[in-house]
Image: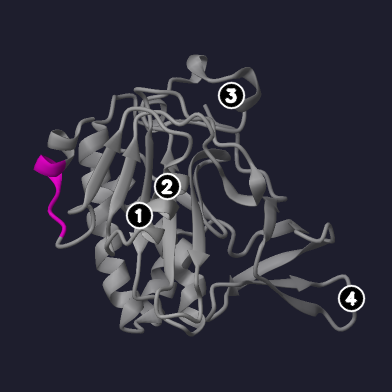
Amino acid sequence: MTRDSIERALTTRSLGRSLQVLSDTSSTNAVALDAAEAGAPDGAVIVADRQSAGRGRLGRTWRSPGGLNLYCSIIIRHLPTDERLGWLPLISATATAQAITQMTTVSPALKWPNDVMVGTRKVGGILCETHGLGRGSAYAVVGIGLNVNWRHDEMPAELRTIATSLADEGQAPVDRATLLASLLLELESRLDLWRTGSLPSLSQEYQDLCGTIGQPVRVELESGKVLEGIATDVGRDGSLRLIDSTTTPPTAHLIHSGDVRHLRADPPRP
């Protein structure tokens, strides 16, 4: 995966046209945040072959070996100032899932808000960070990590029951440059709709892919509080609506951030 191979594959209008490809870095999000502060344009993309300090949601570490996977961060400017902002991680997850569907034989699903799953195993995730909200210079960085060609027997033992890769699931290696180009194209089209306020179509697409909807779930909030109930839908601001039927009358909760676990196990994989 080189700058030339990525640029040859790109068909976007703006995403990735400003491109930085690194052989090794701490975190593409960290580099992108610095680049955004220095004035990097909307749609600028940072890609790394390896990360030494990759980050996931809720302060978790994202394992990032070299030569195998996809680690990229996209700078997004011209942010909406209303409830649409909460949809940025969700539409990024949708774009990622659709790119996987286009480029492989794998059929991913989404776990709210932005985990990309195959069955019960995670194949990718998104970390969105926003800065300067309320100022004219506000921006977001969308970090995307995908396990692409990382074989099951190469993964650390603690990840083998909870993670998977596109190569393992599709039984074939995947070209990372072409996958990135497809992902950026899928994201660009959804960002256009997001900025113009076309939330109904984006919401429907996300909910069609989201395996959390209709599931009994356990949610650990950042405060440490735990909620259980049925995830019924996604609100206009991207929040997860959960119904706790153990109360009388049933209590509705809107979850804006938290760690979600599905309580109904999927059928065992062959």
Among the 4 quarters of the image, the one containing residue 238: bottom right
Q: Which residue is mark 3?
A: 160
**Where residue 172 sits in the image (x, y, percent)?**
29, 24
Decide which of tag 1 and tag 3 comes sooner along the chain.
1
Task: Report the mark closest to the observer, 3 or 4.
Answer: 3
**Disc 3 to disc 2, how far (Cα)?**
20 Å
Q: Which residue is mark 1?
A: 74
Q: Is residue 135 above or below residue 44?
A: below
**Where residue 181 sits in the image (x, y, percent)?**
21, 47
Task: Report the mark closest to the observer, 4 or 1.
Answer: 1
Q: What's the magenta region?
A: 7-12
Among the 4 quarters of the image, the one containing residue 211: bottom right
**Disc 1 to disc 3, how far (Cα)?**
29 Å
Q: Is residue 181 above or below residue 64?
A: below
Q: As drawn, which residue projects farthest toward the front?
A: 38
Per the rendering, the mark at residue 144 is: 2
Secondary structure of residue under mark 4: loop
Q: Is residue 190 left or right of residue 50?
A: left
Decide which of tag 2 and tag 1 comes sooner along the chain.
1
Task: Report the mark closest to the observer, 3 or 2.
Answer: 2
**Disc 4 to disc 2, how far (Cα)?**
38 Å
Secondary structure of residue under mark 2: strand
Decide which of tag 3 and tag 4 comes sooner along the chain.
3
Q: Which residue is mark 4?
A: 247
Residues at circles 2 and 1 in contact by the CB criterion of under 8 Å: yes
Secondary structure of residue under mark 1: strand
For label 1, count other residues whose C-alpha is less than 10 Å away and answer few (under 14), some (14-19) or many (20+). many
